[in-house]
């Protein structure tokens, strides 16, 4: 123990004597260890923590596979009939629960009306998760049937923010979507914090009874039953009940809730972990090279230690201890960097992590950082310690011995440079492909200019059907008179936000499924749809048949022969006439192709809240104030929410590819920087080591430019080997990100050539800067030293 303490003290003293070397080494390691620690904290939150419920291994996600007539397998959620069958059987599950997010937020009335996110759940949902309400009770069977008194449960954060944490809230009444509802409970803190209000799942007669209704189903298996046994038993039960009840045959598929929750995390976390691992390797290689270069200068010192009795094991232990001291210091600084960057990383990580699994530097992450620091110090210090601990007294004290040590260090340093350049090129190739892919993605024509319009959600408080049908046309007409507004309209599905309503249409006697969107005249002009045929609807287009528009795909499918203009069709027993055809629009964003879309006039059939769309010369803040005034002028009690530009919706659709691109780009840039530091350091060391040789050459007539060229050439040949090796490695490694690439091959020759050229030019610059020092060597001074 005393020897270890003595080695640690000596190691610290030696490093403090060379602050420049120590600072570069510690910062290099800090970048590698800090990045690895930060990414591990994300992996810990996403994959390593068990679900925060009792016996999480017994929770499963349940789906049903049905083979369609065309032979394709369709995976869908079970229907309520399936759930009732499993509950009545009782052999497999102690609890089965169904849940579904509301299609759109609800309006909560009060002094400050607001839109709230609602989750519909069945009565066993909380029990299945082993969750007890913080206040009040959960939902019971009596709350599930149609006609039951309306009740709601509040999320913890919403209860605190909206109701001030009032513990007497249970039993009071709120008005939600023009309907009074009694608050029966408050959920515990952290439990599915995304939803503010929870309601009982009270399906209408035809909704949720069928499979594929959009609801999700979870089950809690009874003790002693595993997934294989549960799936086998459920398959037999479901097949028998399908035959008895004449239902379409389906195959039950069970997946652990942990796996279904984390399934989307694995690929991204693996790629980020590999990229950060490359950064750590490059950092270790850099420090190993620095230690080799420093060790060549220390050979006389080590020889003296050996001559006075220090054995090879003693020298090895001392050298390795110095490396570990370096890595521990780098780990401490890296931990600080990880802590500082954690919020930024979480905000930009291309993952939607669960709210009940925050990213933190917990004990497991701290233990990882400590272990990584020790392992890193051992790894990068091992080769220098082995080489330098074998120093021979006679060789080290002689001129030849110093040259031999220099040659060994030079060859080792060149090998390390080649390896780190290869690793950096793999990172740069991945980053380059992501950048190229993202540029292709953002260049996609979505069918209109997202910068040209604003959207806002305007919802009257407690409206009825008749009120909505009158309100939105009146509001749009009022907005057209606002200064700066060029066009105004409304739709139930805003462009680029996704979503549509699938329904049946009768087209010339034939039934077909169509995607419909409702509009108030002015909508197409406000968004900037491209008119292909016919005309846009006007406010004067009223009466029967109601006006409609088709996009090009819908027109081709519905009316394949002849022009669609003036043709008629029916939806929900209402007749519509086609006034015009617009260009195809990618409503779900550039990643998804345009679908056939049918645009129907608002006010026919059931009314629903609409999104206002305005083309204006004014900015969002100024227009928002004008819209609020106009909205209150038409109907005094309204909620105006989510005032956004079309470009904001576009950004939402590409946020995950953008985050992947930014992160891999930063990691690629960091790898490039570290490799250039290594090249710079090794070239500077070579210049210092060969000062006498350079002086002799210049004394015999070598020109400064020749000396610089020689030094740069000697430094760059390992770079060339690294680039060639890195291109081969990149051709294999980039296949991992193939699923993330858009219109880009994982072995894109132009990208590979560009990153190789970038790395080569940067390496030339990194080698040239210290090589210039060689041209300033004084031959007389060098010969005198010789």
Image: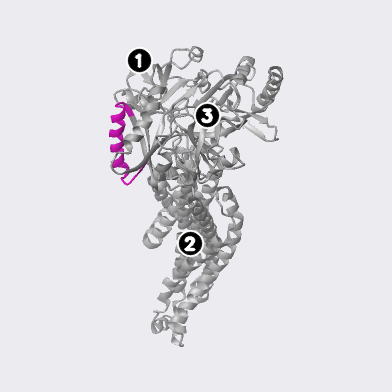
| Residue 668 in the figure: left or right of residue 13 | right
Residue visible at 55% across and 29% down? 570
- Disc 1 or 2, which lies upstream in sequence? 1
The span from disc 1 to disc 3 (Cα, nearest Å) is 46 Å
Of the two numbered discs 2 and 3 on the same chain, state the one appearing first in sequence. Answer: 3
650 and 430: which is toward the camera? 650
For the residues labelled 1 and 2, the Cα–Cα distance comes to 65 Å
Pick whichever of labels 1 and 3 is earlier in the sequence. 1
Secondary structure of the residue carrying tag 2 is helix
- How many marks on residues? 3
Kindly state the secondary structure of the residue where label 1 is placed: loop
User: Can residue 367 be seen by looking at this rendering?
Assistant: no
Query: Can you give x and y, in whole percent of width and height, for residue 146 in the image?
Result: 50, 14
Q: Residues within 10 Å of mark 2 (few under 14, many from 20)?
A: many
Q: Which residue is mark 3?
A: 575
Whether residue 162 appears in magenta in the rendering, the answer is no
> Gap in Å between the C-alphas at discs 2 and 3?
69 Å
In this rendering, which labeled residue sits more in front, label 1 or label 2? 1
Residue annotated with mark 1: 172
Magenta-colored span = 613-638
């Amino acid at each position: 123990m005393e020897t270890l303490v003595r080695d640690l003290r000596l190691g610290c003293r030696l490093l403090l004597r060379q602050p420049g070397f120590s600072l570069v080494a510690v910062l290099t390691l800090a970048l590698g260890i800090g990045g690895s620690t930060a990414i591990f904290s994300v992996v810990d939150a996403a994959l390593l923590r068990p679900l925060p419920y009792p016996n999480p291994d017994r929770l499963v996600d349940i789906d049903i596979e049905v083979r369609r007539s065309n032979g394709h397998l369709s995976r869908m959620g079970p229907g309520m009939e399936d759930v009732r069958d499993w509950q009545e059987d009782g052999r497999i599950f102690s609890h089965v629960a169904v849940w579904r997010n509301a299609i759109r937020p609800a309006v909560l009335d009060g002094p400050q009306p607001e839109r709230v996110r609602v989750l519909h759940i069945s009565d066993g949902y909380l029990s299945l998760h082993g969750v007890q309400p913080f206040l009040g009770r959960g939902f019971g069977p009596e709350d599930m049937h149609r006609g039951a008194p309306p009740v709601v449960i509040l999320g913890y954060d919403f209860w605190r923010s909206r109701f001030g944490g009032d513990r007497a809230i249970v039993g009071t009444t709120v008005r939600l979507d023009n309907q009074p509802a009694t608050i029966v409970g408050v959920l515990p803190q952290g439990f599915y914090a995304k939803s503010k209000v929870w309601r009982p799942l009270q399906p209408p007669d035809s909704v949720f009874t069928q499979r594929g209704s959009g609801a999700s189903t979870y089950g809690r298996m009874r003790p002693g039953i595993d997934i294989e046994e549960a799936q086998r038993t459920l398959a037999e039960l479901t097949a028998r009940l399908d035959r008895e009840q004449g239902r379409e045959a389906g195959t039950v598929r069970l997946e652990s809730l942990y796996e279904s929750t984390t399934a989307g995390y694995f690929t991204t976390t693996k790629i980020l972990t590999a990229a950060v691992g490359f950064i750590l390797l490059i950092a270790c290689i850099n420090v190993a090279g620095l230690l080799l270069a420093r060790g060549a200068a220390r050979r006389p010192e080590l020889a003296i230690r050996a001559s006075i009795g220090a054995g090879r094991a003693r020298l090895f232990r001392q050298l390795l201890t110095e490396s570990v001291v370096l890595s521990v210091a780098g780990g401490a600084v890296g931990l600080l960097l990880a802590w500082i960057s954690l919020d930024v990383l979480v905000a930009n990580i291309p993952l939607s992590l669960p709210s009940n699994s925050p990213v933190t530097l917990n004990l497991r992450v701290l233990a990882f950082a400590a272990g990584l620091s020790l392992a890193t110090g051992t790894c990068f210090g091992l080769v220098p310690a082995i080489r330098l601990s074998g120093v021979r007294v006679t060789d080290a004290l002689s001129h030849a011995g110093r040259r031999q040590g220099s040659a060994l260090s030079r060859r080792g340093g060149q090998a390390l440079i080649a390896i780190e350049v290869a690793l950096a090129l793999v990172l740069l190739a991945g980053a380059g492909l992501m950048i190229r892919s993202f540029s292709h993605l953002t260049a996609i024509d979505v069918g209109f200019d997202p910068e040209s319009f604003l959207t806002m959600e305007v919802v009257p408080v407690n409206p009825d059907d008749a009120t909505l049908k009158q309100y939105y046309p009146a509001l749009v007409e009022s907005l057209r008179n606002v200064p700066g507004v060029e066009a105004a309209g409304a739709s139930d599905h805003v462009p680029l936000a996704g979503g549509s309503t699938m329904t049946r249409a009768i087209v010339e006697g034939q039934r077909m499924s169509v995607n419909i969107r409702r509009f108030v005249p002015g909508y197409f002009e406000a968004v900037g749809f491209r008119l292909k045929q016919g005309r846009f609807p006007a406010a004067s287009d009223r009466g029967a048949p109601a006006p409609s528009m088709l996009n090009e795909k819908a027109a081709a499918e519905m009316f394949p022969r002849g022009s669609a203009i003036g043709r008629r069709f029916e939806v929900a027993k209402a007749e519509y006439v086609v006034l015009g055809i617009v260009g195809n629009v990618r409503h779900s964003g550039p990643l998804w192709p345009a679908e056939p879309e049918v645009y129907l006039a608002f006010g026919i059939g059931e009314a629903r809240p609409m999104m206002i769309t305005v083309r204006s010369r004014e900015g969002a803040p100024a227009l928002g104030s004008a819209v609020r005034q106009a909205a209150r002028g038409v109907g005094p009690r309204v909620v105006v929410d989510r005032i956004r530009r079309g470009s904001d919706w576009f950004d939402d659709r590409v946020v995950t590819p953008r985050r992947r691109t930014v992160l891999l780009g930063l990691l690629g840039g960091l790898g490039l920087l570290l490799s250039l530091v290594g090249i710079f350091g090794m070239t500077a060391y070579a210049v210092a080591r060969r000062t006498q040789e350079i002086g002799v050459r210049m004394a015999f007539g070598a020109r400064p430019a020749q000396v610089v060229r020689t030094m740069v050439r000697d430094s760059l040949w390992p770079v060339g080997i690294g680039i060639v090796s890195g291109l081969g490695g990149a051709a294999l490694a980039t296949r991992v990100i193939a699923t993330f690439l858009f219109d880009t091959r994982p072995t894109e020759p132009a990208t590979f050539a560009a990153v190789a050229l970038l790395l080569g030019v940067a390496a030339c610059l990194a080698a040239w800067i210290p090589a210039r020092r060689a041209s300033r060597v004084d031959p007389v001074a060098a010969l005198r030293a010789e």
